[in-house]
Image: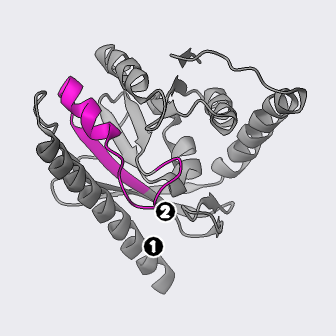
């Protein structure tokens, strides 16, 4: 798959070796686990779960990246990934799973990244954000998805994936690795309409909070659903 808007940085010999090994190993492990997962889709009133082929902007929280990466392979999404070494590892892993990567970040290269994502949307293909990544804080949406929605007029779909059983890291995002044969709920909240193309900073911030609320509803709905599973 293509990497859009990037200039391949120079890496040390050790980093080049890691870039050859780690993405292949990670993708293979994810495929082995992913093939055993059982997904159940739920949605709040008024929400329409996306199905491939889909188009538009989609957001999820960083901690459910692995489950989302496996589930959304048929969507052929493009994702904004930082230009760091860690970002290169992630980009190469996702490309092995069928995703396109657009290089940029909220702190450096962000404007170029959003313009590249705008071009992807213009082709009718979907784009996806880890809305609180790559450094958090957890459950706090960055402004990028809202800015892109204002640029394109596309609504923002919001979802959350929660495995019934997972390893949870002690990282800022409490990153989850689904355990093999786990059930996974795919929880959708209502899509968030795009702000006007000429929206001012106050309006954009209000829309960002609206998006944050929708994503949290998806998360809390997923947690309640998994709790029902565990009580049975």
Residue drawn at x 40%, y 61% as measured from the top left? 139
- In this rendering, the count of numbered labels is 2
- 43 or 177: which is nearer to us? 177
- The N terminus: image quadrant: top right
Percent of width and height locating residue 97: 62, 31
Of callouts 2 and 1, the N-terminal one: 2
Up the image or down, 35 lies above or below 98; here it is below
Percent of width and height locating residue 23: 74, 35
Q: Which of the 4 quarters of the picture holds residue 220?
A: bottom left
Within-10-Å neighbours for mark 2: few <14, some 14–19, many 20+: many
Task: Find numbered disc 2 in the image and state the secondary structure of the residue it sits on.
Answer: strand
Percent of width and height locating residue 64: 52, 55
| Callout 2 touching callout 1 (CB < 8 Å) | yes
Residue drawn at x 63%, y 60% as measured from the top left? 178
Q: What is the span of residues highlighted in magenta in the rendered image?
A: 133-160
User: In the drawing, what numbered circle is on residue 162?
Assistant: 2
Residue drawn at x 41%, y 36% as measured from the top left? 128
Task: Read off the residue under disc 1.
Answer: 226
Lateral position of residue 106 relative to residue 11, left or right: left
Q: CA distance from mark 2 to mark 1?
A: 8 Å
Based on the picture, tell me whether residue 22 belongs to the magenta stretch.
no
Up the image or down, 15 lies above or below 43; here it is above
Task: Find numbered disc 1 in the image and state the secondary structure of the residue it sits on.
Answer: helix
Percent of width and height locating residue 63: 53, 57
Q: Which of the 4 quarters of the picture holds residue 111?
A: top left
Q: Which of the 4 quarters of the picture holds residue 16?
A: top right
């Amino acid at each position: 798959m293509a990497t859009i808007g990037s200039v391949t940085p120079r890496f040390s010999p050790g980093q080049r070796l890691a870039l050859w090994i780690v993405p292949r190993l990670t993708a293979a492990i994810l495929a082995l686990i992913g093939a055993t997962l059982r997904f159940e889709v739920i949605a709040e009133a008024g929400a329409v779960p996306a199905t491939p082929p889909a188009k538009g902007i989609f957001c999820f929280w960083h901690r459910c990246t692995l489950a989302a990466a496996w589930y959304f392979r048929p969507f052929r999404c493009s994702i904004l990934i930082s230009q760091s070494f860690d970002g290169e590892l992630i980009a190469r892993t996702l490309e092995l799973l069928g995703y396109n990567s657009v290089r940029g970040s909220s702190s450096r290269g962000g404007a170029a990244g959003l313009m590249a994502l705008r071009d992807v949307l213009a082709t009718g293909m979907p784009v996806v954000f880890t809305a609180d990544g790559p450094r958090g804080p957890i459950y706090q949406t960055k402004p990028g998805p809202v800015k892109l929605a204002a640029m394109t007029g596309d609504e923002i779909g919001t979802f959350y994936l929660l495995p019934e059983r997972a390893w949870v890291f002690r990282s800022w995002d409490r990153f989850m690795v689904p355990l093999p044969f786990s059930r996974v709920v795919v929880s959708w909240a209502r899509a968030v309409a795009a702000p006007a193309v000429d929206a001012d900073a106050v309006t954009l911030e209000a829309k960002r909070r609206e998006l944050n609320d929708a994503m949290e509803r998806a998360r809390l709905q997923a947690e309640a659903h998994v709790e029902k599973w565990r009580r049975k």
